[in-house]
Image: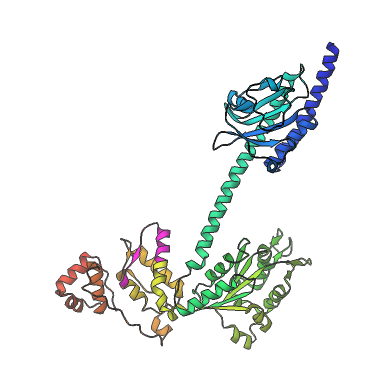
Amino acid sequence: MVVEDGVERSALLEIELATLFQVSQILSNSSPAWETLDQVLRILHDSGELQHGIISLVDPESGALLVSAVHGQHPREREPIRYLPGEGVLGMVLERGEQVVLTRLGDEPRFLDRLRLYDRELPLIGVPIRAGSGRYSGVLAAQPPRCDQWLPERARFLEMVANLIANGVRAAWEAEKERGALTAERDNLRRVVRGQHGFDSMVGHSPSMQRAFEQVRQVAKWNTTVLIRGESGTGKELIACAIHYNSPRAGGPLIKLNCAALPDNLLESELFGHEKGAFTGAVNQRKGRFEQAHGGTLFLDEIGDISPTFQAKLLRVLQEGELERVGSSQTLRVDVRIIAATNRDLETAVEDSLFREDLYYRLNVMPIFMPPLRERQEDIPDLARFLVEKISKQQGRMLAITDSAIRLLMQHPWPGNVRELENCLERSAIMSANGVIAQDVIELSGLNPRSAYPIFPTLAVNKTNLDDPDIDERERVIAALEQAGWVQAKAARLLGMTPRQIAYRIQILDIKMRRL
């Protein structure tokens, strides 16, 4: 009898070791959680002589046990079943935090039989799945095929399996938590990017800008090649971003390259990539911008500055969607939307044989013209307030701009366009100690307006009502000085003051006099 018991125990140990090995292999895989748990229960049933396996995990929010895996049942094939701590046999295991061995399941008054799964005549073993010292993440239960002397041995074996599951559950929970955090961060970044590059963030009510915005809305829906035309500083890159992030390719990459910044040999390597050893310094294989932008958008800024030699190489990629890395004869296919931008007169360049005519027509499928700021002065107030708000966020303080400051901005021709306006406002914000950008802190710089734009029309100055009770004293004095051409004596007469009084006001109100 002793010999038979020894043989039976040896056979049982061999079965358990083989089963543990299979379980450890399954838990080391990166399959979905429910699929992994289902495979563990299948191994217990097929190899471990433990039937009707069930794994219930603790819901972190409610603390209840949620039946997560049942041998032979897909999660979608059953209704969700929960057990509170102490409820039913599974709740009893969780409440006690130790193994429960029932020699005959039908004799246990707490057995609820919600799953309609177990044989009441057979034993049942339930063990906790531990999450740490004194903490539990779930319960593992199964039925041995018979009630015999090996029930304690089977219970210890099931605890070993539960310990392996616990490690897998912890890793899965940590991965799920990290995945959730990454997903939330990704969604938040997408919202931020869409907000920054959405149509609502486009500033400008002038007819020329509204026409450009409408073109952007329409072309964003398609994969059409776009050529953005306009002077430097008019926001061509912002338009390219708006097109990409509001297009079907928004989930793909947006890769940018300034074509004017690189000579031909480096430009070819940057756009097409290179193989290891293709030239001195090519120590590794490198993907070019076209490959990096696969499935997304490639923005080629200053496209009018590339040489005629490189124009021919670029034309082939645009026509065929094929390229070879520098130093390679292998042809690669890419799926890339092209958005190009230039401040050059391409039509004249084509006539002078400086720009290929076939490349011009390949790029000029959907031209969008960005008007210079001097041709849309009515947009300056909204632009100024928008930029001040942007600078306010960058500096981390509240900023405001006065009406007199905006009137001054509207008299400048802005040869540097929106970029110059933003630089001017940032400079003025730095010089404003109290956060109010008034006329006296604005310093207009850059090209001389008269020499740069001799035919620029003089804009009418909107006079502030000096008796308006809604403007403060500092604004009233600055408005009077502005209307008086910054002559103190004239401003004093407008305000009904003496020259000494206005000089005192200028000093105590910290107004910086402008010399015209």
Choose between 52 and 513: the one closer to the eye: 52
Residue, x 80% and y 26% (percent of image)? 15
Count the numbered circles shown. 0
Residues in magenta, as a range: 387-403
- Looking at the image, residue 451 lies above or below residue 45: below
Q: Is residue 142 left or right of residue 433?
A: right
Quadrant in the picture for the N terminus: top right
| The image quarter in which residue 391 lies | bottom left
Tell me: 148 left or right of 355.
right
Q: Would residue 402 be counted in the magenta stretch?
A: yes
Which x, y percent locates residue 22? 77, 33
Placement of 327 over or under 485, stated as above or below: above
Residue 178 x, y percent position in the rendering: 59, 44
Whole-percent x and y of residue 413?
A: 41, 79
Residue 24 shows in the view? no
The answer to whether 426 appears left or right of 169 in the picture is: left
Residue 64 visible to an observer of this rendering:
yes
In the displayed structure image, the side of residue 264 where residue 458 appears, left or right: left
Q: Residue furthest top?
A: 1
Where residue 177 sits: x, y (%)?
58, 43
